[in-house]
Amino acid sequence: MDYKQLTENLEGGDLKRLIHNELHIDEYKSKMGEDCDVCVVSFKVAGKEPSADLVSFIEKGYKDVLDADVSSGEKEGGDYLVFVELARNKELPEQIIVIMTDIMNLTEQDINEWRVRYQKSTKDHLLTAEILRSIIPLSPEAYNRKYGEKDVEAINNMKAMAGVPITTTAPVNDYTESLRRAAGIK
């Protein structure tokens, strides 16, 4: 993995208590390419300026990062989302761990206290390369096998706008099952 020379002013501990210890992967759509080709990693940061500093740190520090960005608006409590886009490939888990290890130096957090969630799942995982390898499709082909090439939500939205009956049902997974239980649907 090649690294660029860092020129920003962030130092160890500068982001202490500002980054939430939960990493989300593939929860958001890529703006750099197709989701099957690009993995989007995101996490919450307290405040717009720390978020912008972190984005600058990530963009300047890693040649494997396709893009990094801050959400346009703040979330509850003044938090902002930071998005990092990386190519979907077999090196992805190690690339994420390298970035997160460096972020730990800025936050003085312990990577063992971090949790990972994949897509819309509510299940937490430890943040390790092995876990990432097991939950993230690491090639466009693996992504398409798992999630299909059709964007069912987009198709259903078009059907709804056109007044065409929607005949598809939600997939059965942990997330949809939790929604069904919450709604009292068996």
Image (tube, helix red, strand yellow):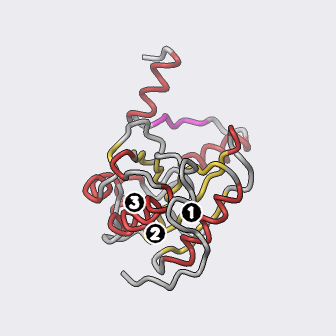
Residue at position x 34%, y 63% in the image: 93
Q: Quadrant of the N terminus?
A: bottom left
SS for dot 2: loop
Distance Cα–Cα, label 2 vs label 1 = 9 Å
Q: In the rendered structure, which segment of residues is drawn in magenta?
A: 166-170
Horizontal and vertical percent position of residue 175: 44, 34
Instruction: Give the amino acid at mark 2.
Output: Asp
Horizontal and vertical percent position of residue 165: 63, 35
Q: Are marks 2 and 1 in contact (CB under 8 Å)?
A: yes
User: In which quarter of the view is residue 91 placed?
Assistant: bottom left
Return the residue at label 1: 30
Return the residue at label 3: 144
Mark 1 packing: few (<14 Cα in 10 Å), some, or many (20+)? Answer: many
Horizontal side of 57 relative to 131 (left or right) equals right
**Mark identifier at residue 37:** 2
Residue 141 appears in the figure? no
Mark 3 packing: few (<14 Cα in 10 Å), some, or many (20+)? Answer: some
Residue 143 appears in the figure? yes
